[in-house]
Amino acid sequence: MLIRNACTLDRGVVDVRCDDGLITEVDSRLRPQAGEHDLDASDCWVMPGLHDHHLHLRSLAATAGSIRVGPPDVQSDDELRAVLQAADLRALPGEWLRAYGYHESVAGPLTRGVLDTTVAERPVRVQHRSGALWILNSAACREVGVDACALPGVERDAAGNPTGRLWRMDSWLGDRLGATMPSPPPDLATLSRRAAARGVTGFTEATPDLSQSSIDALAAAVRSGDIVQRVHCMSTPDIRPPGHQTPGRPTTFTLGATKILLDDDRLPTLPELTEAMREIHRSGKPVAVHCVTRLQLIVTMTALDGAGVLPGDRIEHGAIIPAECFDWLRDHRIPVITQPNFPFERAEQYRVEVPADEQADLWRLGSLLAAGIHVAAGTDAPFGGSDPWTAIHAATIDHSGRDPLETVSPATALGLFWGTPEQPTVPRAIEPGAVADLAVVRGAPEDVRRNPTSVDVVATVIDGIVAYP
């Protein structure tokens, strides 16, 4: 295809020719060839397509049939009861209710007892905004056998009775639901096409410990065209590369780093974490370590010092990064995959929950880049909003009392989503030989600073083929 008369950030107005999945020519005097798709991009910008470097595809797709029960949609106990009871009245007999986005600011710590007072007869499961916790009512606990489960993630009260709160038990719950309540798979095709309409050309799937069958299913969705974007999937060392790739074409489904989850109340010992990293490195895979507290970051840095750093090792989130960690991150060239949308979306909760002495360390961005630390971005959808333009907008504006030094220019914010799956902090360029994953956007990059919804994506090109419109 040929994209004509498009503005670029560094070359002015150019024509861009794509062939066989790659950009082949960039010039100002290209002419359409016979049989070539011709797009006149006058008054538009052409830029690398956006790659969301951290999200959860199946969880995001599942929200389409779920109830949002957290801020800003639901903000009180009465509102929580109202939305769950309304959903209960609409649902078919025997149908489960699935809710997501819960936060304690709504109605305090949620338990099966609290849910039972709202919906007692129908199974209900509620996912916490952090993604670490599911809360089930008693009907749901009976359906999946929580009371008989001896796994450590089952929270129990002082008398030893399950509270309905399941910590880091997504895989167990998914298996139990599959056995007791077969249901259609999440609608990945609709999710994919909505993302393409926003200029998204790639995803990094960051769900930990996905099974071989789950990864094979994602790869099959890419091959079939249900997912039109490239997918880079975090995976454990035992996962086999799935599927068939067309020789000579850029790979559209790849396996990435192994995700390591850390929780402050159940941290592994330092020798255990160090050896786990060594074992993953010995398999040839880097690690992607979930770090949302100061303690988790310090433990990760210490363990990597012991295990040694492998190219591709990365910090996921980096929600709290003290300035004394800057030198280590820069010198070890460990990238931070951040979510600029979180301090924008969760400003009120952070003001209340984050101690005053940690506010300056919360969701750093500009200070990391100024210190020479490599940074890329993802949305963490569905635990954050799924539109990368909201994150790009949030990165460019002062909000919620945040230090203005943490804001960046629109061009820098866009670059956080321009990296390749394997090198997320190295922005792609509009140049011959680059992968033809492009977004054509009406208006100037500065427009995103005003309002993310004002960004008009005219066309999205993935692997040299128009994916939108």
Image (cartoon, grey):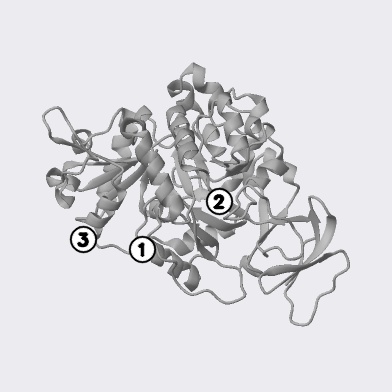
Q: Earlier in the sequence, mark 1 or mark 3?
A: 3
Q: Tag 2: residue type?
A: Asp
Q: Amino acid at mark 3?
A: Ala
Q: Secondary structure beneath disc 1?
A: helix
Give x and y (percent) for residue 193.
53, 62
Residue 331 drawn at (x, y percent) = 62, 36
* Quadrant in which residue 184 is drawn: bottom left
- 315, 462: nearer the viewer: 315
The numbered disc on residue 330 is none
User: Between 72 and 444, which is closer to the camera in this rendering?
Assistant: 444
User: Which residue, given by chain and number where applicable, does mark 2 sit on?
Assistant: 52
Q: Quadrant of the C terminus?
A: bottom right
> In this rendering, would 20 be left or right of 153?
right
User: Relative to the observer, which residue lies in front, 187 or 424?
Assistant: 424
Circle 2: element type:
strand
Residue type for callout 1: Gln
Tell me how far mark 1 sits from mark 2, CA to CA. 23 Å
Task: Say what secondary structure mark 3 lies in.
Answer: helix
Q: Looking at the picture, does residue 131 appear above or below residue 27?
A: above
- The residue wearing badge 1 is 212
Residue 335, horizontal then vertical, whole percent: 58, 42
Residue under circle 3? Answer: 179
